[in-house]
Image (cartoon, coloured by chain):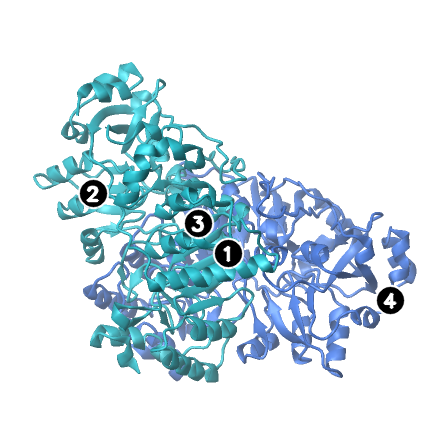
Chain colours: A cyan, B blue
Amino acid sequence: MEHGMVSDRIRMASLRDKIVSAEEAASYIKDGMVVGMSGFTRAGEAKAVPMALAERARKEPLKITLMTGASLGNDLDKTMAEAHLLSRRLPFQSDPALRREINDGEVMFIDQHLSETVELLRSRQIRPIDVAVIEAIAITESGGIVPTTSVGNSATFAILAEKVIVEININQTTALEGVHDIYIPSRRPHRQPIPITNPDDRPGLGYIPVDPAKIVAIVETGKKDSTSNILDPDDETEAIARHLTRFFEGEVAAGRLGLSLQPLQAGIGTIANAVLHGFIDSPFKDLTMYSEVLQDSTFDLIDAGKMLFASGSSITLSKARDEAVMPNFARYRDKLVLRPQEISNHPEVIRRLGLIAINTALEADIYGNVNSTHVNGTHIMNGIGGSGDFARNAYLSVFVTKSVAKGGAISSIVPFVSHVDHCEHDVDLIVTEQGLADLRGLAPRERAKLIIENCTHPDYRPALQAYYDEAVKRGGQTPHCMEKVFAWHLAYKEKGTMKAAF
Amino acid sequence: MEHGMVSDRIRMASLRDKIVSAEEAASYIKDGMVVGMSGFTRAGEAKAVPMALAERARKEPLKITLMTGASLGNDLDKTMAEAHLLSRRLPFQSDPALRREINDGEVMFIDQHLSETVELLRSRQIRPIDVAVIEAIAITESGGIVPTTSVGNSATFAILAEKVIVEININQTTALEGVHDIYIPSRRPHRQPIPITNPDDRPGLGYIPVDPAKIVAIVETGKKDSTSNILDPDDETEAIARHLTRFFEGEVAAGRLGLSLQPLQAGIGTIANAVLHGFIDSPFKDLTMYSEVLQDSTFDLIDAGKMLFASGSSITLSKARDEAVMPNFARYRDKLVLRPQEISNHPEVIRRLGLIAINTALEADIYGNVNSTHVNGTHIMNGIGGSGDFARNAYLSVFVTKSVAKGGAISSIVPFVSHVDHCEHDVDLIVTEQGLADLRGLAPRERAKLIIENCTHPDYRPALQAYYDEAVKRGGQTPHCMEKVFAWHLAYKEKGTMKAAF
């Protein structure tokens, strides 16, 4: 890395003497502080300062509250967790080492709807940010920060923080400049409508506007983003995609949707990615996306001429896709926008545009309540993420999951979910490789019939039907046998398979 | 009732020959139809046609799907349920006889967020309305329908229905004209922002615009709305109000809120009404309201000079308050607006204005999940109503409940709620007469400590603490003893008191 390069990227000349080492920059962060860092779905996270902090935490008492956009790449959460740097963490994470500390009660984890963190900060309902650390491709002539592959919460973190540290990553392409749209809602109660009525509207700025006097340090970095670890489509994810494509064909035939459907949102991960990928061989066209993370499938659909435009908060690609897309980013730039996650996930915009929201369930129950976060009701995996923002406000809220996990030892469809992230009212379709349950306009007893018959794995279907039959004899809007709602979960814990319960 | 009077209220002369008996009007409604009726929180419901339908259902096969705004007065749901007229009912009800049929599985009840019913109708995701029956004070020169004491879903029901029946209630005061604001969001994906940035904005019309050719019958009625059955404040509701007033005083002192707070929403019922009533003797001033139902406390606050303006979807008063307010309604009219419930409860507006939302919990658990609807996990009471619209999108989401019910046999704070309507992320404060838990920015383990210590009744506190202590030993982000999460509920069911569990 040549020093000249990073200077070229600092267009406000007076800021060039702020270039320091990561260690020196990290020295602005003291024990007990609240730190807001860039990073969303392993994209665009600050990379050097957190490592320097972890290094210090191994030698001196240093605990911080860390807020990010969402998950971080480059094993940063792992490194920080193992250095015992984190006392509090919000609003999302996906790292096994950090997860262990969270579930042990060592790190207080505040799992939040991703649109809400900066709303709480802005209204000072949670502790304010002392220092923001933001990865950038450049600093503009006016001192504006141009983010890299994610916007996440970076804009509001930088705007509200007392001090700002910028990490300029010289290996993030400058072709990203122009893809960002930084719109910040005004403060309540005097807020105006968010001026977005189409996925491609751009009411904001191309950079994060901050007072340059707040920029206390600039660090040069070059580490790349981690690539995604999604798996290729398999028979089951292809079946899920097929069920859903057939459903949408029915909606088009019934005149409820046009061939461009409604703007699409898809959660992160293998299944949602596979579902979107499935649209390549569909009759749908002129698709648009208004989502959080833009994954491989977004670019596949653009390349296939199926998708006109995609709005997100980050870009997270597989290694192969990253190598094909990033060097040619200018080709995609006018078909994409990256927004603050508060805007990509804003209830106002989601409801107005009428999204089709496709998210992954960890488990669903016979009435269509969904657990997205907790294993066996107690141990968190990642977090609720944006699924709550989208499922509640979408035109159509779809949850996808394979019907079984752990080689069949776990049924993803259970009598009663062990943790509720999405209540029945926010779940319109449940799709597994077995089939699809269209729950719109149905009462709980009608929902149960469809979910048991269409979505449940044959190994579990008779037992689930028997549970339901017994529950119905006892009555209720939502019949249950309360003394054994978690019998399957307990059986899995004690005997290694839910099947031991029947 | 004189026939001349109703003619005077039909200002479009050509519609005057549509006046028929309730029975004749009801004959437009056939077996199997979907019927949308006015009525929200026992206010402004169609009163004659449903009685005529119930009468017919006693003599001939007649089953309908009935949609309303929310609950109906004058025992209409009871009469229709007992006549076995209803096969499906949405999106809310509060009648014991109907509740029994729902819990027996005789009537399919689709419990919905109150802002969503007409959204689903508009996008044709549920069966369309054949006939709408709307109570009105008048029909305008252009055939527009002027609602009475509620707007609810009446506007969209009438606009989308194939046929419209109007019930002109000559005992609803014409002074109501001018209080309504009928704004209907445009269809998606081409929807524009809802142009409301203050509780007193009036972007709509004073009447429901319908094609007069769709008005097939007009019925004259005179029955009054049922008055509310809320109870007077007692020691416990006063304590809840006191805790909350003190909390808001702290927020003002910390500079997070001004003395006018943020626009207020309060759920229907005794406790929420008492909390608002408590603001009369508070330092707060220039209050506004953006809520669903305007109850006694709204008028008390206006009379006390504490509240400047109140937006709602209906007016439901006690007998004494009704007798004082309605004959003098013109005095209040410019301080009030009644909107479609889709607008009063719209996530876009709720989030933009930044409401303080105060709703009632049936039970809450140690992590702050809330059950608003189901007794013992299975049997529904009323429905989720608007609480989901408000709690998810509010500036501050408050849930209030007395700490015990049934003379102490039930604790409202339990290890694990038996049904989840509001997940932990949507619950900022829990308040009982015991105290207040401010959950903002806290992790589940921290939430549990506050809820157990501050909100739980002393009779249950040691047992709840013991449950939690054992759960924490097992670990997790949300520690639980999964084999006994519902032990308290089962003990109540078997032995008549939750205390039998410990």
| Label 1: which secondary element | strand
Residue found 40% across the figure and 80% down from its top: A481
Residue A177 drawn at (x, y percent):
36, 28
Quadrant location of residue A326?
A: top left
The reply to whether callout 2 and callout 4 are in contact (CB within 8 Å) is: no
User: Is residue A344 visible in this depiction of the protein?
Assistant: yes
- Report which residue position mark 3 lands on: A265
Specify the label residue B20 is tagged with.
Answer: 4
| Label 3: which secondary element | strand
Quadrant containing the C terminus of chain A is bottom left
Amino acid on which disc 2 is placed: Asn
Residue B336 drawn at (x, y percent):
66, 46
Mark 1 to mark 4 CA distance (whole Å): 42 Å
Q: Do badges 3 and 2 share one subunit?
A: yes
The reply to whether callout 1 and callout 4 are in contact (CB within 8 Å) is: no
- Report which residue position mark 2 lands on: A74
Mark 1 to mark 2 CA distance (whole Å): 35 Å
Label whose residue precedes the other's in the sequence (1 or 3): 3
Q: Do badges 1 and 2 share one subunit?
A: yes
Mark 2 or 4: in front is: 2
Residue B314 drawn at (x, y percent):
65, 55
Amino acid on which disc 1 is placed: Leu
Residue B82 drawn at (x, y percent):
66, 80
Q: Nearer the viewer, residue B123 or B271?
A: B123
**Neighbour class for label 1 at 10 Å: few (<14), some, many (≥20)?**
many
Q: Do badges 4 and 3 share one subunit?
A: no
Label whose residue precedes the other's in the sequence (1 or 2): 2
In the rendered view, tell whether residue A132 sits above or below residue A472: above
| Label 2: which secondary element | loop
